[in-house]
Image (cartoon, coloured by chain):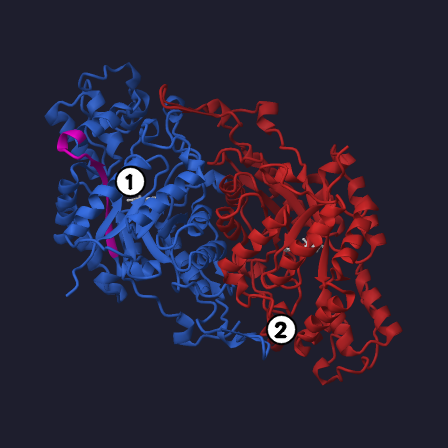
Chain colours: A blue, B red
């Protein structure tokens, strides 16, 4: 019997996942707009037999009022995801491409079209990370005074995905004869208008692009809010998530897998991929030293900026960085259990201001594992074999350096344990991920022609 | 003194510009979704030292009611232009990429972003063919019951371009320090919000992508209506146009160049590039035979479909193809002088139905030159040296075959005459076209920071 295998994605934050990565000598400082950097990274990921590379996205500049901290962050100028992956599709053969795009701010016809185009360009390697966009400084770029409220954003997301799927099905799989002799190019009876008219969108269709090689791109969802989980259960085939303990990750895994039945779906149709940011050393000491070095690169103004959420009314720049905060506030109300954990830790361990911001800024809320290839593989195996993960979204702290280390040191360890592939199994991303190619809804229902 | 040189673009209609190209053995039958085909074509154009490759675009399926003719046309499923060119940017080094996109149906922030991304990915080789979209079967894909009227489409286009230019200028050219030692990544004083609020768009900005290598992509306009010419005069740096006689082309050239002064622009800031579809033979006979072969591939239903506009109330399928039409109608009213020419020709030369539709369908309204490399070069030279063209939009009737012939046979002839480059002069498309890199409007005006 063939052993269940880990699914691995590489999370490509331009200079690396760590907030100060761009100051590290192992990073490429202008990588947000450096295509040669991305080519190198994608080829490294492909050499490591990763299923996919992933880019996060926000259609706007995230400025939060503190110009000093703002001027020191490396993520302010970067390629648009679908164009970036289109470029990389031409210089790679196996790796899948997950592009983030917003159902709140993009247009469904244009989005369906660009992802279908990417799937054709890459011969079946496209995936769409569906986000509803909650970041600041976006709505104004699209003529709105504020974001729509979360409930309607998610309602719109469901409708958006339905429309996109309908457009991707415009042509049946066998619509094209392309017979030069008879002069028949395609069969119009196998072309279907969508004629969608819903609460948020009115879209006639059909799409001017035949069905993507994968049927449609792999649908990904990222995040763990209640409506986010429900969206994932209804439509997603992979879910990216952020947990720092096995117990939390297990609870999440059970929860989302448990939601599938109500949509007539099976547990293996949704892959759960928690994030892991591995800091790799040949010894534990080397790994710890690497981490300490990275943490020390966080400029105080960047670090203090992450503490604002806890002390919104204080001028933190006057605080002594190497003493504990003057007081520890009550955690802000709401579902943000992470704030509880952080503030409780600060209180218990009497963390200094610097230690506290390093803890927060360095991890960005994700699971950081500092260790040897063996200990990192141990932790991944533990989560994988104990109902917490179907694989991981690997977030290299510094790019390209940390991804190369992962490929050279951790991948072979996972392979030795029989946890990871030694060659790509399929040609498309779906085939590699073990996901089925969806059936065309019109072939089934036989809806009316355009 | 260095001689004035021709600018050459290759018009890449998937299987070729001729309506029946896909039935020709020299074409790639599935080329609309075949990336290997486009890679081959782009590399051929680059080998020929073309300035640019160009794709036309409509965001919708052009179905006009005749299913029989519809099923026989090869242009129904094709890549989205910007993703296509992004892919090709990674496997080419010099050629420029002109992508068509609509100011009526795209969003200005997303469009500015994707073109900026393409310009960065290609290291300065992007161009935008600005169209307002008049094709049928598009508005419904974007929730509209009909196209906006032409006047407001063009008014919107002017505003759209202004917004896009403002977004491309978000970061001044020297905004990024990226100094790992000091920890300063960029200077927020050199980042500018747009805060645009106009008749059609409200866009806050800034764009989350630094200034494109070319300042902004080369702006192209295609078409010759009155408002189209005015848009070109105000903003475009190249104009694609369709004329079949030297006199018409000269009149157009004078007209658009004459409109520039009122926008404070010089004649050399707008390149006029008429279309030419060359059918190349080593002898005139060989060329004529090639053309006859292509014309014979036009299926009668496709051909008759092009005649509908003249005989809207007749069932043309009952007509004898090899006899003249039963009657010649009066040309339809309006500014369509081409209809006059066509119907007058039909009457004078007593063309058969087949001859008439071959004349119409084969050329698609563009200038077809059937001849040897020498005679084709003669005609190009004539237009170029007599105030009709700054260069040409070469429309190979069959792809990849006709482009290879052009590169192998006509380019050397143009080079021998000193009319065309023998090596690329610059690194960016602007440099090759001899167009200036625009100054950032915020560096000049010193507008307020984000
Ligand atoms: C690994 C990961 C990646 C994410 N990437 C993005 C992203 O690129 N863009 C985005 O707008 N949101 C992103 N999110 C955020 C979620 O989609 C979601 O908006 C967030 O978790 C807030 O949840 P809620 O909006 O459902 O309340 C990401 C979340 C995770 C866990
Ligand atoms: C060479 C050439 C290419 C064109 N390409 C496109 C195109 O890709 N998409 C489009 O919508 N219109 C295209 N047009 C049409 C024009 O932009 C314009 O819409 C058309 O000439 C009708 O003019 P009007 O809308 O200004 O009246 C093209 C025209 C020419 C001459």
Determine the image quadrant of residue B217.
Answer: top right
Q: Is residue B329 above or below residue B94?
A: below
- Residue corresponding to mark 2: B65
Q: Residue at x 77, y 56 (%)?
A: B374
Instruction: Give the x, y percent position of residue A177.
Output: 51, 75
Which is nearer the eye, B444 or A8? A8
Give yes or no for residue A2 being in the magenta stretch: no
Q: Residue at x 80, y 65 (%)?
A: B339
Residue found at the very far right of the displayed protein: B348
Prevalent SS, magenta region:
strand
Q: Is residue B207 above or below residue B443?
A: below
Give yes or no for residue A282 being in the magenta stretch: yes
- Residue corresponding to mark 1: A404
Determine the image quadrant of residue A158.
Answer: bottom left
- Provide the secondary structure element on which disc 1 rests: helix
- Residue A187 appearing in the image: yes
| Image mark 1: chain | A
Instruction: Give the x, y percent position of residue A352.
Output: 18, 20
- Whole-angstrom CA distance, mark 1 to mark 2, is 56 Å
Magenta residues, start to end: A271-286
Q: Quadrant of ligand 2?
A: bottom right
Instruction: Give the x, y percent position of residue B404.
Output: 62, 58
Which is nearer the eye, A419 or A233? A419
Which is nearer the eye, B254 or B66? B254
Q: Is residue B80 above or below residue A187?
A: above
Instruction: Say if mark 1 contacts mark 2, CB within 8 Å.
Output: no
């Amino acid at each position: 019997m063939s052993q269940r295998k880990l699914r691995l994605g590489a999370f490509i934050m331009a200079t690396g996942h760590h907030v100060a990565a761009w100051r590290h000598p192992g990073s490429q400082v202008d990588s947000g707009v450096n295509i040669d950097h991305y080519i190198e990274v994608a080829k490294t990921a492909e050499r490591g037999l990763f299923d996919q590379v992933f880019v996060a996205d926000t259609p706007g500049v995230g400025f939060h009022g503190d110009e000093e901290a703002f001027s020191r962050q490396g993520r302010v100028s970067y390629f648009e995801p679908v164009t970036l992956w289109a470029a990389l599709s031409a210089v790679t053969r196996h790796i899948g491409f997950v592009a983030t795009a917003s159902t709140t701010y993009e247009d469904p016809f244009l989005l369906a079209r660009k992802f279908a185009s990417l799937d054709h360009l890459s011969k079946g390697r496209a995936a769409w990370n569906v986000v509803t966009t909650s970041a600041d400084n976006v709505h104004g770029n699209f003529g709105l005074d504020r974001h729509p409220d979360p409930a309607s954003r998610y309602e719109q997301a469901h409708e958006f995905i339905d429309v996109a799927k309908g457009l991707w099905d415009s042509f049946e799989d066998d619509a094209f004869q392309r017979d030069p002799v008879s002069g028949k190019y395609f069969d119009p009876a196998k072309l279907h208008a969508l004629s969608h008219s819903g609460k948020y969108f009115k879209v006639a269709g059909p799409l001017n692009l035949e069905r993507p090689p994968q049927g449609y791109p792999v649908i990904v969802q990222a995040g763990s809010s209640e409506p986010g989980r429900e969206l994932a259960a209804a439509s997603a085939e992979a879910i990216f998530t952020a947990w720092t303990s096995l117990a939390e990750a297990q609870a999440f895994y059970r929860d989302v897998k448990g939601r599938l039945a109500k949509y007539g779906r099976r547990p293996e149709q949704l892959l759960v991929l928690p994030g892991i940011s591995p800091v790799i050393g040949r010894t534990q000491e080397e790994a710890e030293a690497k981490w300490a070095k990275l943490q020390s690169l966080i400029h105080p103004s960047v670090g203090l900026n992450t503490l604002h959420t806890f002390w919104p009314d204080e001028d933190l720049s006057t605080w002594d960085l190497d003493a504990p905060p003057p007081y520890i506030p009550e955690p802000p109300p709401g579902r943000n259990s992470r704030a509880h954990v952080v503030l409780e830790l600060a209180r218990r361990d009497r963390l200094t201001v610097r230690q506290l911001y390093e803890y927060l800024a360095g991890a960005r809320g994700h699971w950081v594992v500092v260790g040897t290839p063996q200990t990192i593989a141990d932790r991944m195996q533990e989560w994988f074999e104990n109902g917490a993960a179907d694989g991981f979204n690997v977030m290299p702290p510094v790019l390209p350096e940390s991804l190369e280390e992962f490929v050279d040191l951790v991948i072979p360890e996972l392979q030795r344990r029989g946890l990871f592939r030694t060659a790509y199994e399929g040609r498309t991303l779906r085939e590699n991920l073990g996901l089925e190619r969806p059936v065309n809804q019109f072939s089934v229902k036989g809806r009316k022609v355009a």
